[in-house]
Image: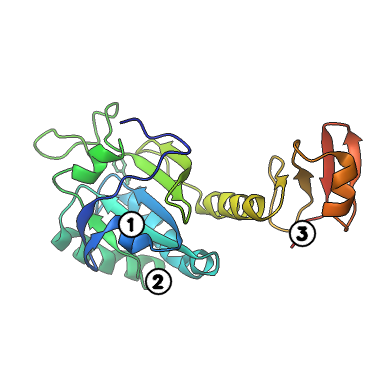
């Protein structure tokens, strides 16, 4: 099954550093981020998970539950978390899925088929750097795949969450490089006449198809 934006995030059972979970029950009514890294005890991954741990309050403020994954076992995860905490001065408290049998990695198409260096000792591919943002209806709202060589920008993931949550609440979209608090774009489905009622902070018509309004927040 190909996962696309709009697909329902497949449910699964897995062992994690915080005990066994059923994914949909873990998410509950929250937003979710499921993200994979190639392998424990690797340099880029160590920096990435330290960053996510440092942003845990930011995710919580947005009602987002975070869960990591790699094709390593629980013992490795637990030992590696100690390194992450030490190096990044954090207390990593989100669960990491132990997917040594690649069950979830296959379900979410996370395995690395192009990087010959990203394999275990038996030559079986590890995971790429995938990110899935999932909304409270379990719908996939963003899919991102980065190569093993490039660490992700987790501020960008927070930015997308802000944009999606704002767009779900108001009939708006967000321009390129938008940051929380910046002006937003009035959705094309809203007439300019309707916009004046919906957006009392003001409507700026740049072109008939490009109308801006101050952030509703
Ligand atoms: C890393 O996290 O540094 C890494 C992992 C797998 C392949 C290449 C780099």
The location of residue 176, given as percent across then percent down, is: 69, 40
Q: Secondary structure at mark 1?
A: helix
- Which residue does the image show at 62% across and 52% down from the upper left? 168
Q: Position of residue 126 (x, y in %)?
A: 23, 39
Instruction: Classify residue 62 by image quadrant.
Output: bottom right
Q: Position of residue 89 (x, y in %)?
A: 40, 72
* Image quarter where ligand 1 lies: top left
Q: Crowding at label 3, few (<14), some or many (≥20) Cα neighbours within 10 Å?
A: some
Judged left or right of residue 162, residue 137 is left
C-alpha distance separating marks 2 and 1: 27 Å
Location of the N terminus by quadrant is: top left
Location of residue 204 with respect to 214 vertically, above or below: above
Secondary element at image label 2: loop
Q: Residues within 10 Å of mark 2 (few under 14, many from 20)?
A: some
What is the quadrant of residue 180 in the picture? bottom right
Residue 91 found in image quarter: bottom left
Q: Residue at x 25, y 56 (%)?
A: 97
Q: Residues within 10 Å of mark 1 (few under 14, many from 20)?
A: some
Q: Which mark is residue 90?
A: 2
Q: Nearer the viewer, residue 11 or 45?
A: 11
| Circles 3 and 1 in contact, beta carbons < 8 Å | no
Circle 3 is placed at which residue position?
216
Left or right: where 89 falls relative to 39: right
Residue 67 to residue 92: above or below: above
> Is 167 or 126 nearer to us in this picture?
167
Identify the image quadrant of the C terminus.
Answer: bottom right
Which circle marks residue 24 in the picture?
A: 1
């Amino acid at each position: 099954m190909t996962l696309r934006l709009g697909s329902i995030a497949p449910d699964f059972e897995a062992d994690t550093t915080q005990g066994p979970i059923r994914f949909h029950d873990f998410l509950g009514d929250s937003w979710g981020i499921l993200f994979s890294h190639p392998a424990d005890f690797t340099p880029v991954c160590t920096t990435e998970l330290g960053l996510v741990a440092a942003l845990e309050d930011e995710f919580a403020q947005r009602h987002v539950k975070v869960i990591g994954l790699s094709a390593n076992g629980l013992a490795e995860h637990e030992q590696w978390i100690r390194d992450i905490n030490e190096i990044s001065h954090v207390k990593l408290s989100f669960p990491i899925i132990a997917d040594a049998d690649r069950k979830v990695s296959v379900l979410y198409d996370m395995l690395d088929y192009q990087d010959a260096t990203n394999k275990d000792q038996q030559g079986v591919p590890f995971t790429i750097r995938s990110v899935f943002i999932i909304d409270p209806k379990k719908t996939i709202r963003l899919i991102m795949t980065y190569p093993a060589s490039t660490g992700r920008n987790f501020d960008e993931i927070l930015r997308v969450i802000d944009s999606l949550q704002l767009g779900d609440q108001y009939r708006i979209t967000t321009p390129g490089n938008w940051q929380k608090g910046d002006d937003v774009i009035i959705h094309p489905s809203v007439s300019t006449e309707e916009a004046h009622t919906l957006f009392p902070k003001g409507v700026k018509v740049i072109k008939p198809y490009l109308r801006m309004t101050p952030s509703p927040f």
